Amino acid sequence: MPPRPFQPTVLVLAFTALALGACALVPPPRTPASPAPEEIPPAPVAPEPPPAAPAPPPIPTSNQICGVQAGRTIDLAELGLPAESRPVAVALGKDTVWLLLAPAQLVGLPRHVKDTAPVAIPEFGAVEEEINVVPGPAGAAWSALAVDRWDGSVWLVSETVPGLWRKRPGRRPEAVRLPSAPPLRRGGFRDVLAGRDSVWVAPACADSAVWRLSPSGKLLSTAFDGAPGSCPAAALERDWSGTPWVLRPDAGAIFQLGFDLGWHPAGDGIAPPAPAPAGSRAIDSWFFWGAEPFGLSRGGAGDAALLYRNAGGRVEAFQEDCGAGNSLVDVAGDERGWAVLTRQWLRLADHQPRE
C-alpha cells in the first residue's frame, strides 16, 4: 500500500489541542490586591480630671484679745494725727504708752489719766489725750520700738535704712553709731529689745539673727548664726514679768535670756507659736497674752491679721475679730497692765484696779 501523504491539518489541530490544554493548566495571572488602607488611630481620650482637692477648712475667728472690754479705749482718729498715719507697734513705759506710727512718728500718751476731760493742743486740735508727737528722721521709716524699763529711754530701729535711735526722757531721738557692727547684707533692723546696759537688735539680713550692743552702739556679742549667705530670722519680746525672749519663727523655737546674757532653749516650759501652718502667711512678730505666746501676721492693707497659737504641739491659725474694717496690730504687757493696738483704736488696762 503506497504511503499516505502527510496531513498537516491533523498536526495543526493536534498542536492546537495540546496548546489549549496547557493554557488550561496555567492559572490566569492574579491582579495585585489593593493595599489595605492605613488604620487611623483613634482620637486620644482626655483623661478624667483628678478629684478636686478638698477646700481648706475656714480659719476660725476669735475675740479673745479684742473682745476684752476692760480699761479705756482711745480712738486713734480723735488724736488729731495726720490722716496718713498708720499704727505699727506699741510699747509700755512706766508712765507712758508709746505708739509707733508710719510714716515715722513716735507718739506718747499718758498711761493713766486722772481727768478724762479733753485737753486741747492747738497744733493738733482738740483730742482726748494729752499727747507727745515726735517726728522720725527723714527717709527712715521706724519699724520697731522698745522701752528701757530702768531709765525710760525709747529705742527705735528702721528695717529699710540701717539705723538705731535712742530717745532719752525729755529729749529728741538721737542716732546711735554702730562703729564695730558686722556688715548688713540688706536693710537695717526688724526688731529691738532694751535691757540694763544692753540693747538687742534683730537684723533684717545678716549672718547672725541677734546682735547684743552696748547703749553706745558697740557690738558685744552675736547669737543664732546662719549658714553663709543666709538671713536667719528672729523676733524679740518680753513677757509680762519682764523676761526677754527670742522666737525663731522659721525653726519654731523659743529661747530665754539667762543670767549670763546668753540665750537658752525654753524646753517644755513654753510652746512656740511657730512655724506658721502650711498655706498661711509668715509670722511678722509675736507677743504674750498673759503667759501664752501668740504669733502675729499683720497682712496687707486689706487683709485681716492672723494669730498663731500652739495647741498641744500643733500650731493653729485663727483670725482675731476686732470689728468691721479693723485689724489687730500689736499687743504689749508688763507686770502692771497691758495694751492692745488695732488699726482704729488703742485699749489700755491694768491687771488690778488702781486705787
Image (tube, helix red, strand yellow):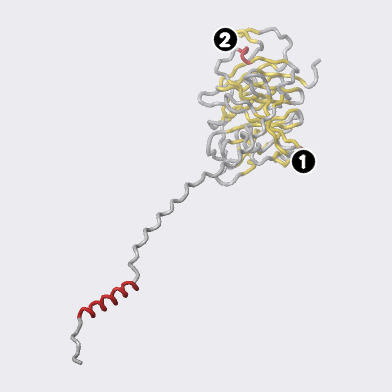
The quadrant where residue 126 appears: top right
Taking the view exactly as shown, the residue that stands out farthest to the bottom is 1
Residue 50: where, in percent of width, then height? 59, 42
Q: Let me know if residue 29 appears in the view.
A: yes
Name the mark on residue 299: none
Q: Which sits in the foreground, 291 or 205?
A: 291
Dot 2 amino acid type: Glu
SS at mark 1 in the image: helix
97 up-or-down from 45: above or below: above
User: In the rendered view of the protein, which quadrant contains the C terminus?
Assistant: top right
User: In the rendered view of the protein, which quadrant contains the N terminus?
Assistant: bottom left
Residue drawn at (78%, 22%), measured in percent from left and top? 351
Residue 168: where, in percent of width, then height? 63, 23
Residue drawn at (34%, 63%), measured in percent from left and top? 31
Q: Which sits in the foreground, 275 or 119?
A: 275
Name the mark on residue 123: 2
Structural distance between the alpha carbons of marks 2 and 1: 52 Å
* Residue beneath disc 1: 268
Dot 1 amino acid type: Asp
166 up-or-down from 113: above or below: below
The quadrant where residue 33 appears: bottom left
